[in-house]
Amino acid sequence: MKHTGTQPFETKRLLCRRFQAADRDDMFRNWAADPEIQLEYGEPVYDTLDKVSELLANIISSYNREDVYRWAIIEKESGANIGQIALCRVYSDKAAAEIEYCIGDNYSGHGYAGEALAGLIDHVFTTTGFLTLEAYHRAENIRSGRVLEKSGMHKTDTIERFREKGEDPVGEVCYSISK
């Protein structure tokens, strides 16, 4: 399986690149400290700048591995870090990975999530050995489902995360796309 790690890619309005220490304030202001965003994203709330700095240090130190794929989503016009997108689970033996993303509330509803996701799918299928990308969302998060569908992903019964554990994805809606 060919891994390339977190290499930058661009879309019309976004630059997706490795996180940097300078992202701290934007992360805190735009999404990492927001309880609603973090709840939907399934992550803890980083409610102090020190906690965001610690998160950033962990992310940045993980970049020495070729199988780590985590991008800061930067709005080109403002230069602001407005979210993140990642391959949060990598199944090298199956040439598959699971996508996760979040966008700050002030930037939600402007097509940024879909733009980042479409860019990620194209980038990953063009530059790596992944053959399948998967994602899921909570059934009540209808907006996320629309983002996944607009990016070309299709509903599926389950994804590797749940197959691996022998679980039914109760309350979750699963999607995938193949190269």
Image (cartoon, rainbow, N blue to C red):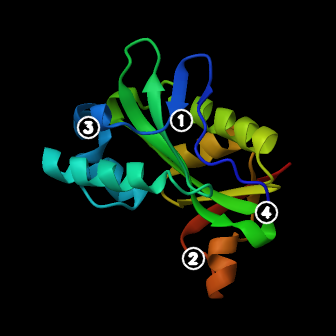
Please name which of the two marks, 2 or 3, marks the residue nearer to the observer: 3
**113 sits left or right of 51 in the view:** right
| Residue 121 seen in the figure | yes
Residue behind mark 1? 113
Q: Earlier in the sequence, mark 4 or mark 3?
A: 3
Residue type marked 4: Ala
Kind of residue indicated by mark 3: Arg
Q: Mark 3 points at which residue?
A: 24
Residue 172: x, y in percent? 57, 67
Residue 23 position in % (x across, y down): 31, 34
User: How far apart, in angstroms, are the residues tagged by discs 2 and 4?
Assistant: 25 Å
Report how far apart the C-alphas of labels 4 and 3 lie in the structure.
Answer: 33 Å
Q: Which residue corresponds to mark 2?
A: 170
* Image coordinates for residue 52, horizontal then vertical, percent: 23, 48
Residue found farthest to the front: 64
Q: Which of 158 and 13 is in front in this view?
A: 13
Is residue 22 toward the left or the right of residue 67 in the image?
A: left
**Quarter of image, res 130:** bottom right
Q: Counting other residues with Cα less than 10 Å from the Cα at mark 3, is it few (<14), some (14-19), or many (20 or more)?
A: many
Seen from the viewer's position, the closer of residues 30 and 56 is 56
Residue type indicated by callout 1: Ala
Q: Name the residue under label 4.
A: 95
Distance of label 1 from label 2 (alpha carbons): 24 Å
Structural distance between the alpha carbons of marks 2 and 3: 35 Å
